[in-house]
Image (tube, grey):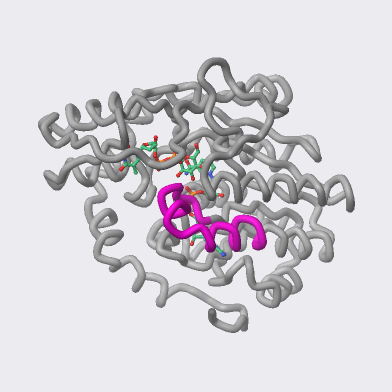
Amino acid sequence: MRVLITGGCGFIGSNFIRFFVKKYPRHEILNIDKLTYAGNLENLSGLEKNRNYGFVKADITNATQMRKVFKRFRPDAVINFAAESHVDRSITSPDAFLKTNFLGVGVLLNCALHYGVTRFVQISTDEVYGSIARGKFREDSVLNPSSPYSASKAAADGLVMAYYRTYGLPVVITRSSNNYGPYQFPEKFIPLVIFNAMNGKKIPVYGDGLQVRDWIYVEDNCRAIDLVVRKGKLGEIYNVGGQHERANIEIIKQILKTLGKPLALIEHVKDRPGHDRRYALSISKIKRQLGWQPCVSFQSGFEKTMRWYRKNGEWLKNTQTGAYRSFYRKYYSTLGLTET
Ligand code: NAD
Ligand code: DAU
């Protein structure tokens, strides 16, 4: 099987590639990534020499590049992780979000259709549902996104489903809750709190810090995506929730305690505009249809995560200094594509 993975140098994509390459040594895997600030080839270090894995620097919004990639690689399956993913950035500069998260998906769908892909998996998010005060969102809940990021992801979900209904493209969508674990860029909440705490810097808490997220250890999400790739019903959407709801402030306190740092580092700052108060997903569909449920408890995932960031101080430092950017020059190929 030939699998095209987009955005594989980011947080979830790189964890997924590590998991997938190991589990399926006979699959041929091509990772394409634009290497934005969030794309870090260091996340995949050690895989360069794997015979069933390749990397090409390319942009999913560039139709010429994508056609070349599909024509040469001829993927059976496509798993689209590529996105602008940080809500705060989408508030200050929405354009790149609309371009990559919506138009880029359109480019991939056109190529998938033209080159006869037999499975297109779109990695979406629970944020498309918006906030929920009580209860949990199901896959058929109304979409009510709050940020330009989540709106661009909701629009992409609509487009993916339209290609299924109109052209019969074999698509499946996953919507997961907040992932945490190794290789997450430290602009996102958990690695940012760890980084700041380790360096004795203030920890910005948006508003009252009582917003709730449903945390999933990234490896649990990788197992869910793998199942959806293999067994997900075409034209269906699967929620992938961690079932570990925590208020932001509780997480900060847990991190400070683990690192032996004072609570005085906490600093309440202005709230994020349009900030969703609570996310919660029902996972009964994926449990019933595919037999998936999270198996890493928050305590155990949290401990693994803390160990990883403490051990990989160099990786964290490189994301701050920009040193990770030089890593790619040694390893990337362009498949004859024009550089962007
Ligand atoms: P990330 O920001 O860490 O990684 C995104 C990757 O996409 C980067 O490697 C980046 O270089 C690449 N990319 C961006 N624009 C591109 C383009 N135009 N062409 C090719 N590559 C491009 O994001 P992540 O946290 O790993 O999220 C991956 C996917 O999962 C996203 O689609 C996101 O919406 C979704 N998601 C994330 C979470 C989470 O908690 N992180 C939860 C649910 C869903
Ligand atoms: O729910 C899935 C989504 O989770 C993904 O689709 C997004 O790609 C991912 O970025 C994430 O979005 P959030 O907005 O929930 O994650 P973030 O890490 O930005 O923030 C988590 C919570 O912490 C949120 O309530 C805002 C708060 N926060 C965040 C930062 C960066 C703070 O209080 N202070 C901070 O400095």
Please report the residue visible at 69 percent of the width from the left and 45 percent of the height from the top. Answer: 157
Please report the residue visible at 39 percent of the width from the left and 24 percent of the height from the top. Answer: 298
What x and y, as percent, mark residue 17? 53, 52
Residue 32 shown left or right of residue 103 in the figure? left
What x and y, as percent, mark residue 287? 65, 22
Q: Quadrant of the C terminus?
A: bottom right
Give the number of callouts: 0
- Look at the picture and state if 24 lies above or below 93: above
What x and y, as percent, mark residue 32? 58, 65
Q: Quadrant of the N terminus?
A: bottom right
The prevailing secondary structure element of the residues shown in magenta is helix
Q: Nearer the viewer, residue 316 or 189?
A: 189
- Using the rendered view, name the quadrant where residue 58 is placed: bottom right
What x and y, as percent, mark residue 67? 73, 73
Q: Does residue 98 belong to the magenta stretch?
A: yes
- Using the rendered view, name the quadrant where residue 128 is placed: top right
Residue 196 shown left or right of residue 162 in the figure? left
- Look at the picture and state if 307 lies above or below 47: above
Q: Does residue 86 belong to the magenta stretch?
A: yes
Q: Nearer the viewer, residue 266 or 216?
A: 266
Please report the residue visible at 63 percent of the width from the left and 68 percent of the height from the top. Answer: 61
Please report the residue visible at 19 percent of the width from the left and 37 percent of the height from the top. Answer: 267
Q: Nearer the viewer, residue 201 or 93?
A: 93
Q: Is residue 52 visible?
A: no
**Quadrant in which ligand 2 is drawn:** top left
Residue 150 shown left or right of residue 265 in the figure? right
Which portion, as a residue range, is magenta?
84-104
Q: Residue furthest top?
A: 135
Q: Is residue 36 visible?
A: yes
- Using the rendered view, name the quadrant where residue 143 is placed: top right
